[in-house]
Image (cartoon, grey):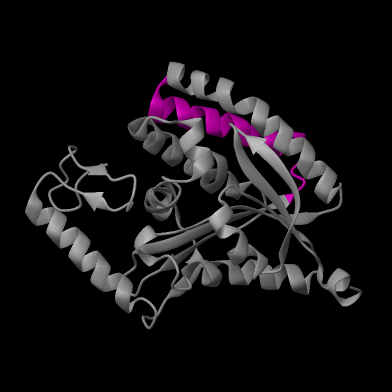
């Protein structure tokens, strides 16, 4: 990932703080200090929730990759930090952002007043059906091969496919065959987490689900996020193992179901 100051390819991302460091101390100081200042003011700054545009695909994918860099499942699937960055970027584009065009769910971003992407979310109108599942899988494989190389992509798929199939089977048990909204992914820039960006970017589709009496579904791979999703009305229905790590399958009841509880 290039240095935000001088665009040098020698920059890297720390696995703990998930902030960009750079090839020179000056750029590191500028990026970290001014990003922290921006984060401290973000609670009162005006935010814009908008449909993601094609020119924001790469920026949103970078935010997703940074947000999930220390995720337990992603770390187990790809232990090597450098390949994990490439994997997460390819996953964001190939599994979620690009397929949003044919999977029926919106791709939304939370923009700063200057137009920077602070957060992103992608939903799906599920169940997808065979044709859309196939297109999404093909798109993901192409992105993985493009960013990681063909052999690395095949090696990674061999590791994760058995877990993917298990989670997919459990999703069917939890949600059945009736239409529902599936939260593919939601991510907030690590420097802005805990300041309401995630809640704001989720709000439009949760309101849509309530207005159209649709249940919602998500797969949470980080136990630290359970309380956040439970605050949005999601309940853990099943727990699966993905590359040796726990994944929580969560369901949010439809409006009519909540009225009868």
**Residue 16 horizontal/vertical position (percent):** 34, 49
- Quarter holding the N terminus is top left
Q: Is residue 64 left or right of residue 101?
A: left
Q: Is residue 62 left or right of residue 12?
A: right
Q: In the figure, residue 45 lies in which quadrant?
A: bottom left
- Quarter holding the C terminus is bottom right
Residue at the top extreme?
Answer: 151
Q: In the figure, residue 56 lies in which quadrant?
A: bottom left
Q: Is residue 185 left or right of residue 196?
A: right
- Prevailing SS of the magenta stretch: helix
Q: Is residue 216 rendered magenta in the image?
A: no
Above/below status of 132 relative to 213: above
**Residue 85 horizontal/vertical position (percent):** 38, 38
Q: In the figure, residue 204 lies in which quadrant?
A: bottom right
- Identify the residue at image location x=42%, y=31%: 79
Q: Is residue 147 rendered magenta in the image?
A: yes
- Nearest the viewer among 138 and 17 is 17
- Identify the residue at image location x=58%, y=47%: 221
- Nearest the viewer among 17 and 61 is 17
Residue at the right extreme?
Answer: 260
Above/below status of 94 relative to 253: above
Above/below status of 153 relative to 12: above
> What's drawn in magenta, residue-wise?
126-149
- Identify the residue at image location x=42%, y=48%: 61
**Residue 156 horizontal/vertical position (percent):** 51, 24
Q: Is residue 66 left or right of residue 217?
A: left
Disc tally is 0
């Amino acid at each position: 990932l290039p240095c935000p100051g001088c665009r040098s390819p020698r920059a890297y991302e720390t696995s703990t703080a998930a902030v960009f460091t750079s090839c020179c101390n000056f750029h590191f100081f500028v990026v970290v200090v001014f990003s922290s200042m921006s984060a401290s003011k973000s609670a009162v700054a005006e935010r814009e929730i908008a449909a993601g545009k094609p020119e924001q695909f790469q920026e949103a994918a970078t935010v997703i990759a940074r947000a999930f860099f220390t995720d337990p499942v992603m770390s187990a699937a790809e232990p090597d930090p450098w390949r994990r960055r490439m994997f997460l970027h390819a996953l964001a584009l190939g599994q979620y952002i690009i397929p949003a065009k044919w999977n029926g769910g919106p791709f939304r971003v939370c923009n700063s007043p200057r137009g920077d992407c602070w957060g992103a979310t992608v939903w799906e109108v599920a169940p997808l059906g065979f044709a859309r599942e196939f297109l999404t899988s093909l798109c993901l494989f192409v992105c993985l091969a493009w960013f990681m190389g063909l052999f690395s992509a095949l090696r990674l798929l061999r590791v994760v496919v058995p877990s993917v199939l298990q989670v997919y089977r459990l999703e069917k048990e939890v949600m059945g065959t009736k239409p529902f909204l599936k939260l593919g992914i939601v991510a907030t820039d690590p420097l802005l987490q805990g300041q309401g960006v995630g809640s704001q970017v989720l709000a439009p589709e949760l309101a849509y689900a309530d207005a159209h009496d649709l249940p919602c579904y998500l797969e949470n791979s980080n136990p630290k996020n359970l309380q956040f999703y439970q605050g949005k009305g999601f309940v853990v229905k099943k727990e699966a193992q993905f590359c040796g790590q726990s994944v929580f399958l969560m369901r949010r009841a439809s409006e009519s179901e909540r009225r009868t509880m």
